[in-house]
Amino acid sequence: AGGNMEDALKLGSVQEGMLSQRAIAEIYLAMRRCPQPIVSLISGAACGGGFSLALASDIRIADSTAKMNCAYIRIGLGGCDMGSSYFLPRLVGSSLAAELILTGKFIGAERAMSLGLLSQVVEPGQLESAVEEDLQLMLTNSPLGLRLSKEALNVNIDSGSLEAAIALEDRNQILCAQTADSQEGMAAFAERRAPNYRDA
């Protein structure tokens, strides 16, 4: 899925278009700031804004019918929109990102998987069951550890150095180690039982 073409044709003035663009862009920014992991399940076509929503997600799982593209360039717009020029090169490298953005070509599920754009490809109808294991595993982790891990991943994508990345990781580990959940996690591991985290 992607944006509604009828709405795109009614943008109005440049100023109105900029307001609309900024409002849509806030969705992608909110996804990155959201402390909980965001998982996209992709079936069929994810074009334009739909592709960008998937790119902004933390984990992407598709079925074998999935195909994705930066559709904007195919309709007379620039190929970069809604964060695609930020996310795509970080996920697949600059050469393939340029190819997809400048041509509007579709990338299928198998190729996307082989390039690391997707973490899993499953048969149609299997998306929900495929994501269930990841969700359950995440839910067994401490809430603070999960939030700080997502934060570190997002911040360190843009880190200027290994030293800056390690400094953030060090801070997060010390913060987590001072919590009751950390003590519970270590005790549960030692006692070979499931932890009972309380986000404390």
Image: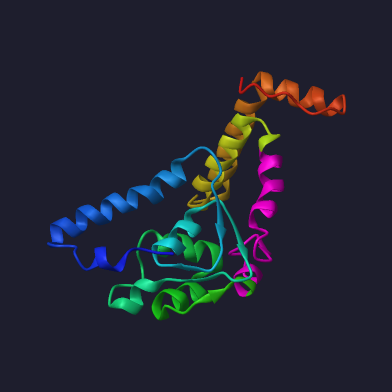
**Quadrant hosting residue 152:** top right
Q: Position of residue 167 (x, y in %)?
A: 57, 38
Which of these two is toward me, 49 or 170? 49
Whether residue 56 sits left or right of residue 132 in the image: it is left
Task: Check the image and report above or below for 138 versus 109.
Answer: above
Residue at the image position 70 percent from the left and 40 percent from the top: 136
| Nearest the eye: 173 or 35 | 35
Could you say where residue 103 lies in the image, as x and y percent from the top left? 41, 81
- Image quadrant holding the N terminus, namely bottom left
Q: Position of residue 43 (x, y in %)?
A: 56, 64
Magenta residues, as a range? Answer: 111-138
Query: How does the figure colour the protein chain or chains?
Result: rainbow
Residue 61 on the magenta segment: no
* Viewer-nearest residue: 106 or 1: 1
**Residue at the image position 64 percent from the left and 73 percent from the top:** 110
Quick one: quadrant of the C terminus? top right
